[in-house]
Image: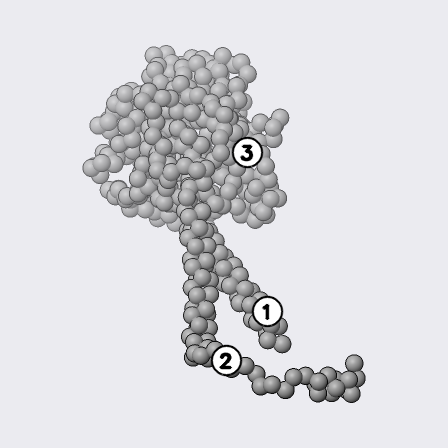
């Protein structure tokens, strides 16, 4: 259409004046527009609030659709072990935020071949409950899980301390119990009721710089040749000296009335008054296992090869992993004769007087396994395996368990159950904040996009 045609079309149009606007239209148009804007803004704000609340609810509800309260054992119910221990997850909640209740295992979990990936975890005794021990977030430390699985005792691996920390797995709270003499403190054993701690204390003054530089558990190593055995009542803070120097390992009797102690290459029975009762004449070159040496019946001790090693500041004593023979047993009544044999890499505790719980690498499945190991030398029976997927170091490595501590009093009658969805509790605070910030940013982006689309549509309608 050319200009002449457009002009002719306009000339032919009716010339009557435009009809008048309805009365009050202009006066009501601006308030109506303002109300529409307020309504849209309120709707957008409400949508953002709902999104934030839904995001917060999704984060704060414990994983696995379980309540964030300790799992309560049924009366008379034995502890259970899942047939597959869940893999590493940075979204595992903490003990302080969601207490797990009584635990069966305490262990470090991770890998550090190229990039350090690590967690300290507890596994519940009554359900597939996993929690990070936030009191020990960065590395393994001298620790003990009590025989009833309800408390954990912690110390430091590379410096002197003036107290031990006690974590209550029922409440998630941590308290400090002072020790009478500050020094390098190594928890060795807890009484069956979890009230009496046997520990080693050593003066680190001569080796303080070496301890600070060492990346491992220097205090534990040094104390085997220089530490003194002490007994500490965790309820009252009262400590009892024993005069036993040095001390490498200890275990309480099932009745909690005495201990068996490894001092140098000799084994002793010690009363709760700190006095030596008698020497246990185990075969030469053997000593008690590092933890849980006393059998449930009180009749047997688990023993392993021990050796000594000279250092600049004296001698230290340790389990001789290079000597064949695995874990053996001796009778308290006749300790000079070696008895049963349990072929396992790491002794964890007694399942009965005829079977022990051991940890070893399962080469068939290429992962760590917990097994019931008969003392008659017959093959072990795998109870549970650790997850074999590549979850550490950004998916480049498998995770490996370290320094496993078991609730020795829960091992009798230990059952195995089919693993269920892991209850990991609420996400750690850092992940909650990051997720909430992400939800807020997404809500803001949605609101801005909707606003721009509305403005574009309004402009197109006017043109």
Which of pointers 2 and 3 indicates the residue nearer the eye?
A: 2
Which quarter of the rendering shows the C terminus? bottom right
The reply to whether dot 2 and dot 1 touch (C-beta < 8 Å) is no
Q: Is residue 260 left or right of residue 9?
A: left
At 40% across and 32% down in the image, what residue appears?
Answer: 124
Name the residue that disc number 2 marks. Answer: 21
Q: Sequence order check: which comes first, mark 2 or mark 3?
A: 2
Q: Sequence order check: which comes first, mark 3 or mark 1?
A: 3
Q: Kindly state the secondary structure of the residue where label 3 is placed.
A: loop
User: Where residue 151 appears, x then y in whole percent?
Assistant: 32, 35
- Relative to 224, is 39 above or below? below
Instruction: Decide which of 155, 91 is in the foreground and name it.
Output: 91
At 55% across and 34% down in the image, what residue appears?
Answer: 387
Q: Which mark is residue 200?
A: none
Q: Which mark is residue 387?
A: 3
Q: Classify residue 219 by image quadrant.
A: top left
Name the residue that disc number 1 marks. Answer: 457
Which of pointers 3 and 1 indicates the residue nearer the eye?
A: 1
As measured in the structure, the alpha-carbon distance from the residue carrying label 2 to the one carrying label 1 is 25 Å
User: Where residue 208 appears, x then y in whole percent?
Assistant: 39, 49
Q: Classify residue 135 by image quadrant.
A: top left
Q: Kindly state the secondary structure of the residue where label 2 is placed.
A: loop
- Relative to 431, is 454 above or below? below
Instruction: Decide which of 40, 95 is in the foreground and name it.
Output: 40
The reply to whether dot 2 and dot 3 touch (C-beta < 8 Å) is no
Which of pointers 2 and 1 indicates the residue nearer the eye?
A: 2
At 41% across and 44% down in the image, what residue appears?
Answer: 61
Instruction: Decide which of 37, 191 is in the foreground and name it.
Output: 37
User: Where residue 255 appears, x then y in whole percent?
Assistant: 27, 20
At 38% across and 19% down in the image, what residue appears?
Answer: 412
Q: Residues within 10 Å of mark 3 (few under 14, many from 20)?
A: many
């Amino acid at each position: 259409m050319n200009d002449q045609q457009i002009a002719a079309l306009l000339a032919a149009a009716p010339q009557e004046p435009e009809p008048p606007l309805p009365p009050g239209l202009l006066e009501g148009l601006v308030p109506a527009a303002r109300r529409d804007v307020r309504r849209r803004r309120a709707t957008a704000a409400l949508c953002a609030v709902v999104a934030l609340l839904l995001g917060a609810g999704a984060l704060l509800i414990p994983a696995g659709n379980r309540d964030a309260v300790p799992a309560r054992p049924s009366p008379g119910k034995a502890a259970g072990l899942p047939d597959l221990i869940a893999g590493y997850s940075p979204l595992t909640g903490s003990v302080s935020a969601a207490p797990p209740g009584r635990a069966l295992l305490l262990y470090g979990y991770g890998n550090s071949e190229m990039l350090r990936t690590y967690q300290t975890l507890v596994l519940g005794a009554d359900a597939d409950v996993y929690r990070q021990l936030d009191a020990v977030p960065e590395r393994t430390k001298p620790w003990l899980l009590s025989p009833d699985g309800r408390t954990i005792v912690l110390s430091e691996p590379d410096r002197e301390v003036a107290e031990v920390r006690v974590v209550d797995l029922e409440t998630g709270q941590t308290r400090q119990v002072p020790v009478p003499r500050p020094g390098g403190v190594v928890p060795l054993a807890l009484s069956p009721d979890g009230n009496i701690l046997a520990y080693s204390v050593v003066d680190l003054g001569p080796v303080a710089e070496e301890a600070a530089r060492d990346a491992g558990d220097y205090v534990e190593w040094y104390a085997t040749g220089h530490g003194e055995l002490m007994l500490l009542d965790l309820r009252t803070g009262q400590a009892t000296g024993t005069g036993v120097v040095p001390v490498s390992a200890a275990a309480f009797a099932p009745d909690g009335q005495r201990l068996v102690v490894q001092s140098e290459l000799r084994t002793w029975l010690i009363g709760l008054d700190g006095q030596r009762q008698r020497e246990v004449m185990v075969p030469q070159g053997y000593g008690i296992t590092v933890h849980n040496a006393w059998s449930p019946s009180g009749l047997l001790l688990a023993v392993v090869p021990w050796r000594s090693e000279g250092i600049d500041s004296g001698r230290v004593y340790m389990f001789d992993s290079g000597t064949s023979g695995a874990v053996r047993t001796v009778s308290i009544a006749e300790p000079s004769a070696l008895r049963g044999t349990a072929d396992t890499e790491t002794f964890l505790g007694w399942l009965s007087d005829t079977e022990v719980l051991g940890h070893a690498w399962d080469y068939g499945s290429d992962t760590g396994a917990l097994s019931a190991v008969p003392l008659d030398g017959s093959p072990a029976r795998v109870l549970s395996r650790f997850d074999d997927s590549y979850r550490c170091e950004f998916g480049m490595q498998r995770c490996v368990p370290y320094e496993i501590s078991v609730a020795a009093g829960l091992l009798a009658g230990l059952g195995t159950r089919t693993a269920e969805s892991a209850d990991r509790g609420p996400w750690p605070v850092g992940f909650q904040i990051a997720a909430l910030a992400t939800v807020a940013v997404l809500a803001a982006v949605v609101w801005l996009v909707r606003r721009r689309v509305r403005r574009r549509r309004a402009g197109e309608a006017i043109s």
